[in-house]
Amino acid sequence: MNAVKAYAAQSAEKPLGPFQIDRREPGSTDVEIKILYCGVCHSDIHTARNEWQGSMYPVVPGHEIVGKVTRVGDSVSKFKVGDTVGVGCFVDSCGHCNNCKNHKEQYCENGHTQTYNSYSQDKKTITYGGYSSHIVVTEGFVLHVSDKLPLEKVAPLLCAGITTYSPLKRWNVKAGDKVAVLGLGGLGHMAVKIAASMGAEVTVLSRSKSKAKDATELGATNFELTTDPENMKRLANSFDFIIDTVSALHDYNDYLSLLGTDGVMVLLGVPPEPSTVQAFSLIGNRRSVVGSLVGGIKETQEMLDYCAEHGITSDVEMINIDQVNEAYERTLAGDVHYRFVIDMASLV
Ligand code: NAP
Ligand code: ZN
């Protein structure tokens, strides 16, 4: 065991603060990583504050990790000391179920291990995430990261990037498709960039007028205010896809009505409270509502390579670790442009 510095939430009500955790000594297939940057995902906030229930304190959040390999186990073949690497939302899975064999580890039938607030495959040890100086991960769940792109802007790709790339691929979004991105935050801004790079005509649906200019700069063709009922009426039946990234309770029916025939609404945001879908919202225009959870490891590598090739990174605001509580408040207020990323050098 190695004691390493971290930042943790000790309860749902308390702000995050300094904490020390133990990382395992790298085993034969393990890679030890010194963390350089870690993105702040809204899931970190939901979990730190126990909004989804089931938080196991202390919680050390963080699943948008980029760093350098410091040690490798004897059997590690894909990585060496000094490599630049990434770790995303999960760090292990059973490896032998149907989904694991088909590169869908996030849907492991025996339960995948998330990067934090989750049980390791021993079903005993609780995982701690990237708000820490080092992490130890089995090599099959470590990603190669190109040194060509600024690493702090790559970190958010490990969650926000893959979570939006995966459904865009799965539902075969292509040139000319009309894609609406609902909510322009961390996931939303990546959805805009990636969908636009695939040739889609992207519309941002947002309640924040102040984001209109950014939406265009990020690659959207249109920006529409969701708070304006006239706008919403005018947009009825107009999209092929809606990528819903909203983190708080909202009425799905309002947005389903914007889909044309065979339109698909992909739920990515996970509001803590349930919301009702009316059958009428689906049967008209034969619409679907679907969900998607991050993406498998192979697909995450594909996404990182795709982003490196297309020069796609996240728009980030760098913070020191002691600003993370303030960053949470600003994220909740929608004041994020468009991902906070922690410079882990500030964890001293
Ligand atoms: P974020 O940066 O806070 O962005 C969420 C955006 O949703 C906000 O910027 C805002 O955009 C909009 N929004 C927030 N509250 C709203 C409200 N009350 N009504 C209407 N719009 C609201 O969050 P994120 O990191 O992108 O994460 C978004 C959600 O996805 C979270 O629930 C997170 O847990 C979830 N998530 C899911 C997966 C997955 O695998 N499915 C992976 C990662 C995260 P506007 O200001 O433009 O309206
Ligand atoms: Zn995330």
Image (cartoon, grey):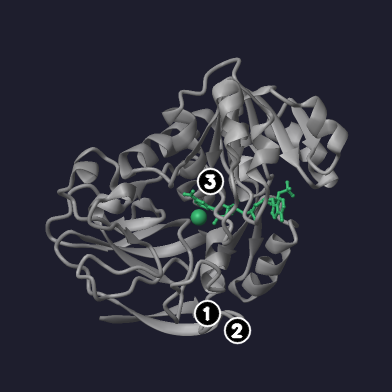
Q: Which is nearer the N-term, disc 2 or disc 3?
A: 2
Name which residue lies at 51% across and 61% down: 38
* Labelled pair 1, 3 in contact (Cβ < 8 Å): no
| Image-based side of 111 in relation to 67, left or right | left
Q: Which is nearer the N-term, disc 1 or disc 2?
A: 1
Q: Quadrant of residue 324?
A: bottom right
Name which residue lies at 53% across and 75% down: 347
Q: Above or below — where is 232 with respect to 51?
A: above
Residue 159: x percent and y percent?
48, 50
* Labelled pair 1, 2 in contact (Cβ < 8 Å): yes
Classify mark 3: helix, strand or loop.
Answer: loop
Classify mark 1: helix, strand or loop.
Answer: loop
Judging depth in this view, the residue of 74 and 17 nearest the camera is: 17
Residue 119: x percent and y percent?
30, 69
Which label sits on residue 9?
A: 1
Q: How much space separates mark 1 and mark 3, taking CA atoms?
A: 24 Å
Disc 1 crowd, CA 10 A, few/some/many (<14, 14-19, 20+): many
Residue 40 in view in this figure = no
Q: Amino acid at mark 2?
A: Lys
Residue 53: x percent and y percent?
48, 71
Name which residue lies at 48% across and 69% down: 61
Residue 66 in view in this figure = yes
Asked whether mark 3 and ligand 1 are closer than 8 Å, the reply comes as yes
Judging depth in this view, the residue of 142 and 126 nearest the camera is: 126
Which label sits on residue 30?
A: none
Q: Amino acid at mark 1?
A: Ala
According to the picture, the residue beneath numbered tag 2 turns out to be 14
